[in-house]
Image (tube, helix red, strand yellow):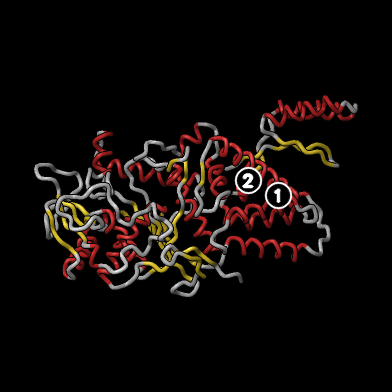
Amino acid sequence: MTKIKFYNTLSHKKEFFKPLKDRKVGLYTCGPTVYFYAHIGNLRTYLFEDILKRVLEYNGYKVKHVMNITDVGHLTSDADTGEDKLEKGARKERKSVWEIADFYTKQFKEDLKALNIKKPDVWIRATKTIKQQIDLIKILESKGFTYRINDGIYFDSSKIKGYNQLLCKKKANLKAGARVKMVKGKKHPTDFALWKFSPKGKKRQMEWDSPWQKGFPGWHTECVVMSIKELGIPFDIHCGGIDHIPIHHTNEIAQAKAAYGKMLARYWLHGEFLVLEKARMGKSEGNIITLNDLTKRGFLPLAFRYLCLMAHYRSKLTFSWQSLKAAQNSLNNFYKKALEFKSAIATGKNTLYRDKISKSNKYKKEFLTEINDDLNMPKALALAWKVIEDKTCPKREKYRILLDFDKVFGLGINSLKMGKIPDKIKKLVQKREKYRKEKKWEKADLIRKEIEKTGYKIEDTKNGPKVAKISYF
């Protein structure tokens, strides 16, 4: 079997993957901060992580996938200043923070479902682990890694050797731990808040008693606690967006090392940005597009999934409506071919195909080579089209191969079905057949084009014309 290779941000190179436990993988993926809708830049990261999970499963691994929900502690500034995003969102929408968190968590899960992203095995919310986060901070305090200033308890990053090890020297634009401005009293720019005190004279909706003062946890502590709680330390793979490298994931590693003397995870995988008009897409940049925005324009959510498959997860992906339209057209053609091949299983004869097993195995071996080379989806997708265009491979076998590939692609081929044909379309088909018998080819072709404009596909066979419309789910 082809061994899996991943680009490990920790070592800044591709490495063969070897889990801690045979055939079992512990996977932690940083989840959303649920104060607003996820944008498609966020969703690209979750799609890459879904592909990763599917590739591991395709290789026969049993994956325990944990994802957190950040419902407290994520401030509007990486400089440990500003308001908690949940508190700000609640005030803006005139709801409680709990209502905001519940609503956007539900919306996020609906987006995942629409994109055919597999659910994690464990959902875990930051507000459900406050005690464990306080316990971690107490350990850090007992070992001399913390100090107190006016607004909270901070981690002293200067006491960790190799604090910047996630940061590749080539990524000069990403300064590890760099902040927009310094909080008064902080010893070093890269120090970060472990526990923030509730502002004097102002009651927060989310605040808890602690050994230091009433307040709430910093953002970077939650993932350390939640990942270790479910997966132990170290665990196999930790994932997130590339923006997590210089601050969030760097600070997770620092806390784990300081508290337990161990690396939090052995492999760190990061997805690149989705780019919109030469700028990163983000809520703070004010240039977000949601999945709902795509569907309002008539695009299938899975067209966005297909678009993401066309680029490697470690490469920037430039989004445009034109590129999404091209992706949807390609996906529609992909579906049409798959449905055509599926129909051949039910209607075709059991013709002898001596090489079908070896041919199928050859394609599957090639597929495994591509997906195991750091999740090379563009090459894997190109291989799928090679199967589609292979004239020496029977349609029934093509369908079985594509169905197998789709365990990783997640495009829902197994859910494709024929739609009901309206009487209007049936009459056009009959009219076209009449012209064909009269050898009026130009008129027949015009009617074919008219039929296809309505989203139906017509195919001429020995048994007469066949017409179908694909229903996607």
Q: Residue at 35% across / 42% down in the picture?
A: 104
Q: Amino acid at mark 1?
A: Lys
Position of residue 131 measured from the top left corner of the image (x, y, whole percent)? 21, 60
Closer to us: 174 or 403: 174
Q: Is residue 41 left or right of residue 82?
A: right
Q: CB under 8 Å between callouts 2 and 1?
A: yes
In which image quadrant can residue 212 be found? bottom left
145 up-or-down from 187: above or below: below
* Label 2 secondary element: loop
Q: CA distance from mark 2 to mark 1?
A: 9 Å
Q: Residues within 10 Å of mark 1 (few under 14, many from 20)?
A: many
Q: Which sits in the foreground, 338 or 321?
A: 321
Relative to 80, 388 lies left or right: right
Q: Nearer the viewer, residue 410 or 233?
A: 233
Residue 416, numbered label: 2
Is residue 123 visible to us here?
no
Q: Position of residue 254 (x, y in %)?
A: 29, 64
Q: Is residue 316 left or right of residue 139?
A: right
Mark 1 = which residue?
A: 342
**Lower sequence index among marks 2 and 1:** 1
Q: Residue at x 25, y 69 (%)?
A: 259
Tell me the number on the disc at residue 71. none
Crowdedness of circle 2 by 10 Å Cα count: few (<14), some, many (20+)? Answer: some
Which of the image's four quarters has the N terminus? bottom right
Q: Is residue 138 visible?
A: yes
- Examine the image and state in which quarter residue 107 appears: top left
- Residue at 57% across, 39% down: 323
Amino acid at pointer 2: Leu
Count every numbered label the image shows and give the total.
Answer: 2
